[in-house]
Image: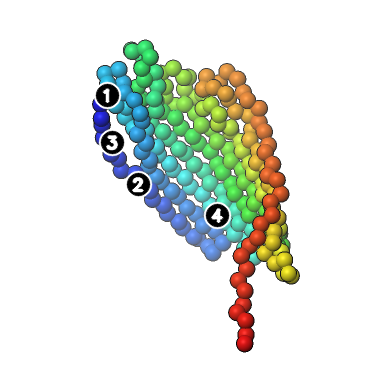
Amino acid sequence: MSGRNTAWSPRTGLVYQPIERISLYATYAKSFRPQIGTTFDSSPYQPTRGELMETGIRFTNPSQRYVSTVSAFQIKQTNVLTADPVHSGYSIAVGEQRSKGIESNNTFQLTRDWNIIAGYAYDTPQVTRDNTIPVGNILAGAPRHTGNFWTHYTLSNGGLKGLGVGVGVFGSARRFGDTNNTYLTPGYARGHEPVLFTRAVRCKPSQR
């Protein structure tokens, strides 16, 4: 059986700057994703629909060497597949999942050559409607805490101008291994090996 799904996926945002160094923003968006398969009566599944709401603040210090963004978000998905309570072995698209959390990203320019980037996110991705999974359970494979740290140093003077090196680490807290939340997988930290890179430098034209 063939089918056709259409949807309107708007995206809008608003930015307000009360003073030069502070910006307040808000974002709203909808998404649409078709699903493969059919129900017991051979009807195609309704597409999964998503809704994003986010608001945050961006701060820059007077010297512009420190930039920080803190945001709060909510992502909701509807028409998630869940077990058909009447026909065993089939699914229906009536489930719902919601993710709420906060996120922070920060950039520090310690010197002209040395920069640090650090971020942290707290997320609670939960089941909010389902025929088999208890409401309130955390989604499988989704950690509540994640963080990252990256630093790089780039030479701004001398014969090696533009040459730099960077290193970083990413960390994740424990996460549930299944949607029934019966067991946890351990958290981990993954380091980024030092990376050498070059930044393009514009050369002045020669004078003749």
The residues bearing labels 1 and 3 have C-alpha atoms spaced at a distance of 13 Å
Can you name the residue that lies furthest to the bottom here? Answer: 208
Q: Which mark is residue 58?
A: 4
Residue 19: where, in percent of width, then height? 53, 62
Callout 2 amino acid: Pro
Residue in the image at 56% along x and 48% along y: 70
N-terminal of the pair, mark 1 or mark 2, is 2
Residue that label 3 marks: 5
The residues bearing labels 3 and 4 have C-alpha atoms spaced at a distance of 38 Å
Q: Nearer the viewer, mark 4 or mark 2?
A: 2
| Marks 4 and 2 close (CB-CB < 8 Å) | no
Quarter occupied by the C terminus: bottom right
| Marks 3 and 4 close (CB-CB < 8 Å) | no
The residues bearing labels 1 and 2 have C-alpha atoms spaced at a distance of 27 Å
Residue that label 1 marks: 43
Determine if residue 23 is in view: yes
N-terminal of the pair, mark 3 or mark 4, is 3
Q: Which mark is residue 10?
A: 2
Identify the element where label 2 is drawn: loop
Identify the element where label 3 is drawn: loop
Can you name the residue that lies furthest to the right here? Answer: 158
